[in-house]
């Protein structure tokens, strides 16, 4: 069986698919989900970030849900990422703060250094120009200390020490960062989809090559990777 969790405008839907049947069920309703992350080491554990109501967690594939005992101070959660190497889970919020949980979402710690970057005063989201948010978080498949974070609108920020310190946006990457992905077969590669196009890094985000040449449109919203073939 293949199981997929999807965020609609208001609900989280679980899809169970096999060779002979298809089943869809709303397992969390009325929460305005904006981010989903499945724990790669415990696939029945799913994290949901909502537009204004914080984080929900299930340990049993949506049969029941719990809230954090010590939640992030920001209730608008627009990005989530669960590590395949540790129990760390990261939540990105509006305004642009990054939180980490080490106990499966029961408590969350603010990583304040992200907001200390020199470019931070210039971050601004066009739809709500008085604010900005962490739109996407990509984790290194092997090194748990390597984080890459996309700010909408601010750029791609990276940390090599688990978020204790950060390197600011490299203009070789796009600044309107929407989606960042890594792949276990090429762990140092980072893929970016952005409002200005797409970009690729082969060295954990230190340098980038823009790759939107030949597209008939360049506003990129999301990326999907072939699990077996990272070039696809």
Image: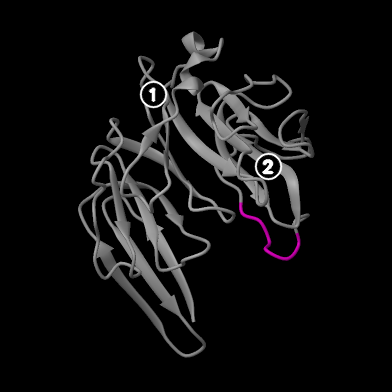
Q: Which mark is residue 159?
A: none
Q: How far from the left and from the top, in percent, is residue 158?
A: 62, 29
| Mark 2 residue element | strand
Q: Is residue 227 magenta?
A: yes
Residue bearing mark 1: 127
> Mark 1 and mark 2: span between their CA atoms?
24 Å
**Would residue 145 appear left or right of 41 to someone viewing this image?**
right
User: How many C-alpha atoms fall within 10 Å of the one at disc 1: few (<14), some, or many (≥20)?
Assistant: few
Q: How far from the left and from the top, in percent, is residue 121?
A: 47, 9
Q: Earlier in the sequence, mark 1 or mark 2?
A: 1
Residues at discs 1 and 2 in contact (Cβ within 8 Å)? no
**Would residue 160 appear left or right of 5 to someone viewing this image?**
right
Query: In which quarter of the view is residue 138 placed?
Result: top right
User: Which residue does the image show at 39% across and 39% down from the upper left?
Assistant: 78
Relative height, residue 155 to residue 186 (above, below):
above
What range is drawn magenta here? 224-229
Q: Which mark is residue 191?
A: 2
Quadrant (top left, top right, bottom left, bottom right) of the C terminus = bottom right
Relative height, residue 170 to residue 220 (above, below):
above
**Would residue 81 appear left or right of 142 to someone viewing this image?**
left
Dominant SS in magenta = loop
- Furthest residue in direction left, as rendered: 30
Tell which of 213 and 88 is nearer to you: 88
Tell which of 180 and 144 is nearer to you: 144
User: Which residue does the image show at 35% across and 51% down from the upper left?
Assistant: 48
Q: How far from the left and from the top, in percent, is residue 223?
A: 61, 48
- Furthest residue in direction bottom, as rendered: 20
């Amino acid at each position: 069986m293949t199981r997929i969790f999807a965020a609609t405008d208001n609900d989280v839907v679980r899809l169970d698919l096999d060779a002979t049947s298809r089943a869809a069920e709303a397992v969390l309703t009325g929460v305005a989900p904006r981010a989903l992350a499945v724990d790669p080491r415990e696939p029945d554990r799913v994290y949901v970030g909502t537009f204004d109501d914080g984080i929900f967690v299930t340990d049993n594939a949506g049969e029941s849900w719990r809230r954090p005992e010590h939640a992030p101070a920001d209730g608008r959660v627009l990005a989530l990422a669960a590590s395949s190497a540790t129990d760390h889970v990261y939540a990105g919020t509006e305004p642009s703060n990054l939180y980490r949980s080490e106990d499966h979402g029961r408590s969350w710690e603010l990583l304040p250094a992200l907001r200390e970057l020199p470019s931070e005063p210039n971050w601004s989201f066009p739809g709500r120009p008085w604010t900005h948010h962490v739109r996407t978080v990509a984790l290194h498949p092997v090194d748990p200390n390597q984080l890459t974070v996309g700010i909408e609108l601010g750029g791609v920020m990276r940390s090599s020490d688990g978020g204790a310190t950060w390197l600011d946006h490299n203009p070789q990457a796009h600044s309107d960062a929407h989606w960042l992905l890594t792949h276990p077969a090429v762990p140092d590669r980072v893929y970016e989809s952005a409002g200005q196009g797409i970009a690729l890094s082969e060295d954990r985000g230190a340098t980038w090559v823009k790759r939107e040449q030949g597209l008939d449109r360049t506003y990129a919203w999301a990326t999907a990777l072939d699990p077996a073939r990272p070039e696809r």
